[in-house]
Amino acid sequence: MRPLDLTGKDPSRRVTIYFEGQPLEAYEGEKLTVALLANGIYWLTTSTEGRKRGAFTFGPVPVVLNGIKNINGRKTKVKDGMRIERQNYGEFQETVEIDEGKPVERLVVDVAVIGGGPAGIGAVLEVQEHLTAAIIEEKGWLGGDLWLKGLPQEGFGDPKKAVKELTGKFNENVRVFKGTIALGVFDKGEYFLVPIVTGKNQLIELMAKRVVLAVGAVDNILLFENNEFPGVFRRDFALEVMNVWGVAPGKKVAVVGSRPEDIVPELERWGIEYVIVPNPKRVEGSERVERLIDMNGHVYEVDAVIVSDGRRPDINPITQAGGKLKFKRGYYMPVLDSRHRIRDGIYVAGSAVSIKPHYANYLEGRLVGAYILREFGFDSNPCLYEEKLKEYEPIPMAVHRIPFESLNLEDVQICGCDVSLKKVDDVVRSGITDLQIIKRLTHLAMGFCQGRFCLFNGAVVVSQRTGSDMSHIDLPVARPPLKNVRMKVTAEGVKEYAE
């Protein structure tokens, strides 16, 4: 077994890859970043500011693959004999690519469900008997955050077994698109146009009469010095490497953030040594995490840090589709009508609405499915799900005060696009408090993800420096497309897409 393997791997799939000329054991089908981690390699790229970075916090992971520069390391699967070298950010821009040789396809359904977690699955199961549906999931699996768990979950029991059983009930009215990115939601007459790009770079124009945004939540980024250093993990990445790939994030890890309970049971399940550090100040090391220092000067000798600081609704798809936001329970959330709509025809369900247990998200998906059935004239009972949902109270999230005076702000990364906390703070202290202008001046939230992970902390800086309530700060609306696109379609395809 490799240094950080937690489970045995299929020997028939064993291959050899080369990183910086060094032969390494890997397995067909593994993500490149996971294979390198299993071999104890954390440092993969260097930012434009010369900062070493890994693959499990934020920011792009460009690598040189078989002599070709600007390959996205996060999306690369292992193949025998491949040769990988480190690359700095340089001219790399993370994009969704569309194959120029494939004509644009069209698919018409009654309901488009964006997001394949418990809420999305619930919505599909509710409508599928009477309506056609497409479920679009960016990850390579359905189940969302539930799929990443290894311990029994309330209402579901074994997570992976539950997801397989539920998705196994999908009937012939359902089209499933995994590893597929939705570029936005656009009005087109009586339909909504949802352009999607599959894992094979195929552009599909999805036309739907109703849309369900079940896009889930994103992990909060905690602000401390060198918070993006190789060996620092977001909670969701740590869960994925352990429970999907059977690889440990490290042999002794520090858990930081306001919700250690979201990751500690999983570490205990795998027998990984850990320490909880409630007040991190700085991470240090040469090519990977070697120690964590807290605000009191205590030093923890660890080889990885997991940030488990809660989650917040993914609001970008909501604002792009025309939704409004409000601030409640420590996060921005959509303003919904009595039928969970941001406007006619577009529904929101699950963690994209509020943070709650997986089973509550599933029930909320069934609820919006029941509302949709009623709109189409079919019998349904949304009241049943409304009553069950009353048993679940949404979970509030802490909004941390930033200890500006205790941190070297240049070493704190607020955005993976090489935007330091100092850069944003300097602009705010100069008197500019409009986040749209702050974006332009600092490049905050200007990268591939359009601020899914960093915009909230930008709002916290403005709030704290000006004394404004978070509810009074306007977040910029996400611009279409939701991900940067490299258009490579043929002339015929461009014409068809534009009509």
Image (tube, grey):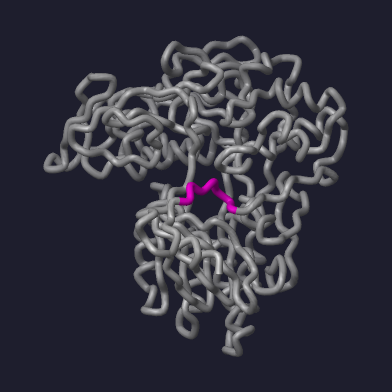
Q: In this rendering, would 313 be left or right of 29?
A: right
Q: Residue at x 76, y 50 (%)?
A: 328
Q: Residue at x 49, y 57 (%)?
A: 154
Spot occupied by residue 479 in the image (x, y as percentages of width and height) = 66, 51
Residue situated in front as seen by the camera: 379 or 80: 80
Q: Is residue 485 magenta?
A: yes
Q: Nearer the viewer, residue 180 or 315?
A: 180
Look at the picture and state if 177 lies above or below 75.
Answer: below
**Which quarter of the image is occupied by the N terminus?**
top left
Find the residue positioned furthest to the front.
491
The outermost residue toward the left is 12
Q: Quadrant of the C terminus?
A: bottom right
Queried whether the magenta region covers residue 346, the answer comes back as: no
Q: Is residue 189 above or below residue 281?
A: below
Which residues, given as a range, are shown in magenta? 481-487
State the predominant SS element of the stretch in magenta.
loop
Q: Is residue 73 visible?
A: no
Task: Identify whether 474 is placed above or below 295.
Answer: below
Would residue 158 be found to the left or right of residue 392 on screen? left
Classify residue 179 as left or right of residue 281. Answer: left
Count of number-bearing discs: 0
Q: Is residue 367 above or below residue 330?
A: below
Q: Quadrant of residue 493?
A: bottom left
Visible residue check, residue 460: yes
Quadrant in the rendering for residue 425: top right
Residue 486 location in percent, x, y? 48, 47
Task: Please tell me in which quadrant of the rendered image residue 282 appears.
Answer: top right
Across and down, in percent, residue 74 comes to 40, 38
Residue shown at the point (32%, 31%) measured from the top left:
68
User: Residue 114's spot in the image, x, y percent?
Assistant: 53, 62
Task: Kindly identify the residue that appears in the image at 59 percent across and 78 percent down.
Answer: 370
